[in-house]
Image (spheres, helix red, strand yellow):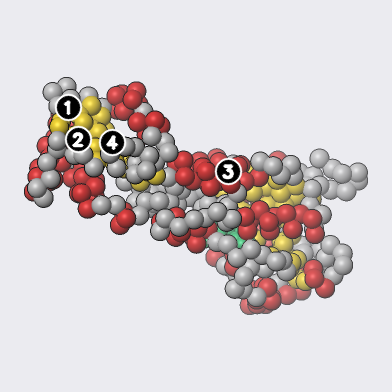
Amino acid sequence: MTVGATKQRLGLLGGTFNPIHLGHVQAARIVKDRCRLDRVLLIPSFIPPHKEDREVASAEHRFKMVQLAVAEEPDFEASAIEIEALGTSYSIHTLDRIKDSYPEAEVFFILGIDAFMEIATWKDHEKVLDRCSFIVISRPGYSLEQARKVLGGRLEDRITDLSEDENLGAAPSSAGPAILLLEIDALDIASSEIRRRLQDGASISGMVAEHVREYIKEHGLYMTNQEILPTEIKLCVKAAGDKKAEDILVIDLRGISSFTDYFVIMHGNSNKQNQAIFEGLDYALKQKEIRPMSVEGKRHAEWILMDYGSFIVHIFSPTARAYYALEKLWGDGIKHTF
Ligand code: ATP
Ligand code: MG
């Protein structure tokens, strides 16, 4: 799409967005206005999932949160371009694909100074730098001037500080497309700080959009700090894991349910395995003098329910688990996945 005779000015803001926060959205808004961009794509990177790595939410969750954060911004769009590509995300590939989809557009890579300082580590960074303009924004704790030293000062000729330039910055010079520095009143928010707060059970209101906060809560993202769970729950998780129980989930029901504090939910792939999980759990807890008040469903092992009073263990078959959908029913509780 072109505006009159001028090319569409398209900004790309990539990131892990783990999760997206108000600092990202505010920065994108300022850049869009100051640099007169027509559109900004926010592009969450794909990160190969490692079961061990609980720090990074799945690509799907991160993408959905970006969608929620920009739902009210008509000129912003969550782009799944890197997530759909599945492999490790490289800017050079993203840029090629964007240029295919928007052949008419003038493309600007938007990034914080912290990210720009790492550009030497990008695959084919010389090519990326040759093929599009950059807008580098300030971030608390970093000096924007450091951009001039990147790659041994080789980019110096292409850099324009927008705070000293009334216009949109220098036209592309023979040295290559422009690199524009934009000092903004950046919010002092980082995703890593948000994750830390969630693990500590602290509030993140005012750091992310309200809908993003609700989404994080609903899906129990980042709240997987096992340390805050009671010992007997950790013991259950460990014993279940030893018997290869799948998708072990703890729901913290304190303040939500009157009959118990925690659900420990899992499934096994056969009745035999469920029996083994039951026996393993029963044994491990008995070692600590913790005995169930009642046990149901042991014979068919489709749904074994071990009621310990302050917590209840549910060992399901995959079908019964999907059918009873306890995790949905008790969706208000904080979830810990293992
Ligand atoms: P983490 O702490 O996990 O690294 P982050 O807050 O830095 O997360 P990223 O997804 O790594 O978020 O950042 C994506 C892009 O947004 C980067 O270019 C980064 O420099 C920029 N950015 C992140 N937070 C801010 C902010 N508060 N103000 C301006 N730019 C930001
Ligand atoms: Mg970062």
Label 3 or label 2, whichever comes before in sequence order: 3
Q: Residue at x 62, y 70 (%)?
A: 140
Residues under labels 1 and 2: Cα distance? 9 Å
Callouts 3 and 2 close, C-beta under 8 Å = no
Quadrant in which residue 319 is drawn: top left
Q: In the rendering, at what x and y percent does residue 302 appear?
A: 22, 24
According to the picture, the residue beneath numbered tag 2 turns out to be: 307
According to the picture, the residue beneath numbered tag 3 turns out to be: 211
**As drawn, 13 above or below 217:** below
Marks 3, 4: nearer the viewer: 4
According to the picture, the residue beneath numbered tag 4 turns out to be: 259
Numbered tag placed on residue 246 in the rendering: none
Quadrant in which residue 294 is drawn: top left
Q: In the rendering, at what x and y percent does residue 11 appear?
A: 72, 52
Quadrant in which residue 154 is drawn: bottom right
Residues under labels 1 and 3: Cα distance? 39 Å
Label 1 or label 2, whichever comes before in sequence order: 1
Does residue 268 appear in the picture of this structure? Answer: no
Identify which amino acid the numbered label 2 is placed on. Answer: Asp
Numbered tag placed on residue 296 in the rendering: 1
Residues under labels 1 and 4: Cα distance? 17 Å
* Side of 105 relative to 336 (left or right): right
**As drawn, 182 above or below 191:** below
Q: Secondary structure at mark 3?
A: helix
Q: Secondary structure at mark 4?
A: loop
